[in-house]
Every structure is written in C-alpha cells, then in structure tokens.
Image (cartoon, rainbow, N blue to C red):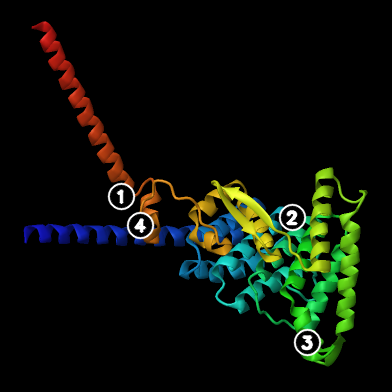
C-alpha cells in the first residue's frame, strides 16, 4: 500500500507540475502577443517591424490550433490598420510577412485565408476607395505582397474564385513581368506558375463550354471568353521565354540575372510540357524535396522569413515537418516521438523543472565523485605515510 501511495503522490506532483507549466506558458503567450500588438498600434516603424516578426515567429512556434487561431483573430485588425499608418518599406514588408505566416498557421477555413489575400491584393494592385496605402507602393513592397499572396494561395486547393477575379489576377501579374525590378518579375512568375498549376482556368472552360459567366463590381452579368484567357497564357509563355534568355540591361547584379534565367526556364518548361521544378536540400543529413510549384513557393517563403533559423525549425517543428513531409533524424531522444507537446516543451526549456532536476542530479554526482576521489587520495596518502 505504501508503494502505491508513493506512486500516487508522485503522479499528482507530476500532474501539478504539468498544469503549472501550461498555465505559465499560457500567461507568457498572452503577454507576449499583447505587448507586440501594442507595439504595432503605437510603436515606431522599427518597433512595428520587430513586433510583426515576433508575432509571426510566435505563430510558427505554437503551431496550428487554438493559440494560432487566437493570434490571427487578435492581430488581423491591428495589422490592417498599420498598413494605413505610413508607407515605409521595411514596416510594410514586415507586416505583410507577419500576415502571411499567421494566416498560414492559424486560419480556420478558406474564408479567413481569402480575407488576408484580399488585403495583400489591395497592396499589389490598389484601387480607389481601398483602405490600404493610397500611394504607389515601392518595388520591394509589391514583391513581398505578391510572394505573400502566392504563399497563401498554396493553401487554397479547390478554391473557386470568380473567373473575373482570376482574369484580373493573371492580367496584372503578367504586366509585372515587364517591370524593371528583377525580384518583382520572379515573384510574379512564381505566382502565375502556381495559378496554372492549380488548373482552375481549365476547369472553368470545361464546365462553361468556352464562355465564363462573371459579374462586374455593380453585379452586371458578363461573359468572359476563355480564348482570351488562353491568349493571356500564350503571352505569359512568350514573356517567360524572353526572360529566360535575357542578356542583361534590366536589374542589377549578375547573380540576380542568373536566378531570373533559371526560374523562367522552369516556368517555360512547366507551361509548355507540364513539368514543375524539383528541388532537394539537406537538413541535418536528411533530404527535403519539393515536387510542385506550391511546395517550392512555401519553401522559398519560409526560408526567407526564418533565415538562418530555418533548419532548426524544420528539425523541431512538427507543423513544418507535416507541411513538407519531412522526417528529421532523432539523436539521443529515445521515445521523443511518443511524448506530448507539453512534455517536449518541458524537456527542451533550459529553465524547466526537468532540466533543473537534471542539473541538480549532475551536481550531486559530481560532488560524490569528488568525495570519492578525495577519499581515495587520503587512503593512498595514508598508505604512503605508513
């Protein structure tokens, strides 16, 4: 009975510790989020940029679920308002990246994703009456907005926007291929490839026998001839061919020129033959592969956002591992895959009860070892003296 009683006491202690850790995590999570949101509402451009990045990292850290949904719900309005509070490029870029990441992780259905995409599209292609920055955005802002919009579009498999919206998107993105900024051309090329990879235009024509019903802003019914959309595809194919062989003159560095050529060769091969680019990178000795434009766009966006921390996130984030179908090597973590997220958090934290107990045990062992060594030394001295 005493053994069972001891086990029950130990079990209750562990349960209380788990509950205390969870409560502390909840408090710290809420405090950090609200402090960052206050910075976005009232801070300087530098503070807004840092707070936006922190919120995005927080969403990736907690992963999908109630916390990520809370981050999106609490942040969407302050972020939308912050787009109107100035046009400094670094600030707007940070806000766009943040909106993309928290939507990617925390959106609960296509409606929430589409809402964020609409905010981004108004920055890409502002219209009169829109509640976003009124002045013409800079090339870096448009590039980031297009990349963020494409990143979220990768999650909208089966999405059925109006044909008019698709036509507007394809037409405007095609116009960006003629822009002087190389990064913008590459972002637009990736977005267009993704749209054609999703195959929505072909589905529309199959269902409408060559004509697509649409509506203008006043609700008047119109018909869009699919041959016009096919003509756009032909135009994009010609643009991709030109950009894949560009001799220079537009843009700046040779590295950027080579990146553009390689990317548009991939676009050209995809539009002509249907083969998307395949990439492989090693993380901790394990290959991470992309086989579609959707996967490549997700990979490129998250690598840019996480920077040097990308590999570590891939090795530790179950969410990102699920996104890319990636299984990292597990070293010295027997049974790690079978413990809860709370236990993993407890295990990892340097200030956790587990790590503190482990440190105390090591110190105890060290002291005992030192004691034995001293005793052994004393015995040896005693023998020598005798």
What's the distance in space between the residues labelled 4 and 2, CA to CA? 41 Å
Q: Residue at x 67, y 79 (%)?
A: 159
The tag earlier along the polypeptide, 4 or 2, is: 2
Q: Are marks 1 and 4 in contact (CB under 8 Å)?
A: no
What's the distance in space between the residues labelled 3 and 2, CA to CA? 42 Å
Q: Nearer the viewer, mark 4 or mark 2?
A: 4
Residue at numbered disc 3: 206
The tag earlier along the polypeptide, 2 or 1, is: 2
SS at badge 2 = helix
The tag earlier along the polypeptide, 3 or 1, is: 3
Residue at numbered disc 4: 343
Q: Nearer the viewer, mark 2 or mark 1?
A: 1
Tell me the quadrant of the picture where the N terminus can be found.
bottom left
Residue nearest the viewer, comparing 176 with 119:
176
Q: Can residue 369 be seen in this view?
A: yes
Q: Nearer the viewer, mark 1 or mark 4?
A: 4
SS at badge 4 = helix
Residue at numbered disc 2: 89
Residue at numbered disc 1: 353
């Amino acid at each position: 009975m005493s053994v069972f009683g001891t086990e029950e006491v130990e079990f209750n202690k562990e349960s209380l510790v788990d509950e205390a850790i969870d409560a502390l995590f909840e408090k710290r999570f809420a405090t950090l989020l609200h402090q960052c949101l206050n910075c976005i509402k009232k801070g300087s451009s530098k503070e807004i940029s840092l707070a936006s990045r922190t919120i995005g990292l927080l969403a990736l850290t907690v992963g999908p679920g109630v916390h990520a949904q809370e981050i999106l719900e609490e942040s969407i309005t302050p972020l939308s308002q912050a787009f109107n509070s100035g046009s400094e490029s670094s600030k707007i870029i940070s806000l766009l990246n943040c909106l993309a990441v928290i939507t990617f992780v925390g959106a609960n259905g296509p409606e929430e994703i589409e809402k964020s995409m609409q905010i981004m599209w108004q920055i890409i292609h502002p219209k009169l009456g829109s509640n976003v920055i009124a002045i013409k955005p800079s090339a870096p802002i448009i590039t980031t907005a297009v990349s963020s919009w494409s990143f979220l579009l990768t999650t909208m498999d089966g999405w059925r926007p109006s044909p008019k919206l698709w036509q507007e998107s394809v037409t405007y993105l095609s116009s960006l291929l003629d822009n002087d900024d190389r990064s913008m051309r590459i972002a637009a090329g990736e977005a267009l490839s993704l749209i054609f990879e999703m195959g929505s235009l072909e589905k529309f024509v199959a269902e409408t026998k060559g004509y697509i019903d649409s509506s203008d802003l006043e609700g008047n019914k119109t018909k869009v001839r699919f041959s016009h959309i096919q003509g756009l595809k032909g135009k994009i194919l010609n643009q991709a061919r030109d950009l894949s062989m560009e001799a220079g003159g537009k843009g700046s560095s040779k590295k950027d020129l080579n990146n553009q050529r390689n990317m548009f060769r991939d676009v050209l091969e995809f539009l002509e033959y249907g083969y998307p680019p395949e990439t492989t990178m090693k993380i901790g000795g394990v290959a991470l592969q992309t086989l579609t434009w959707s996967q490549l766009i997700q990979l490129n966006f998250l690598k840019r956002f996480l920077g040097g921390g990308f590999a570590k996130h891939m090795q530790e984030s179950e969410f990102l591992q699920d996104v890319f179908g990636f299984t990292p090597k597990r070293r010295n973590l027997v049974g790690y895959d079978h413990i809860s997220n709370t236990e993993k958090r407890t295990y990892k934290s340097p200030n956790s009860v587990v790590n503190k107990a482990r440190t105390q045990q090591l110190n105890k062992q060290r002291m005992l070892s030192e004691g034995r060594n001293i005793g052994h030394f004393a015995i040896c001295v005693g023998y020598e003296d005798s």
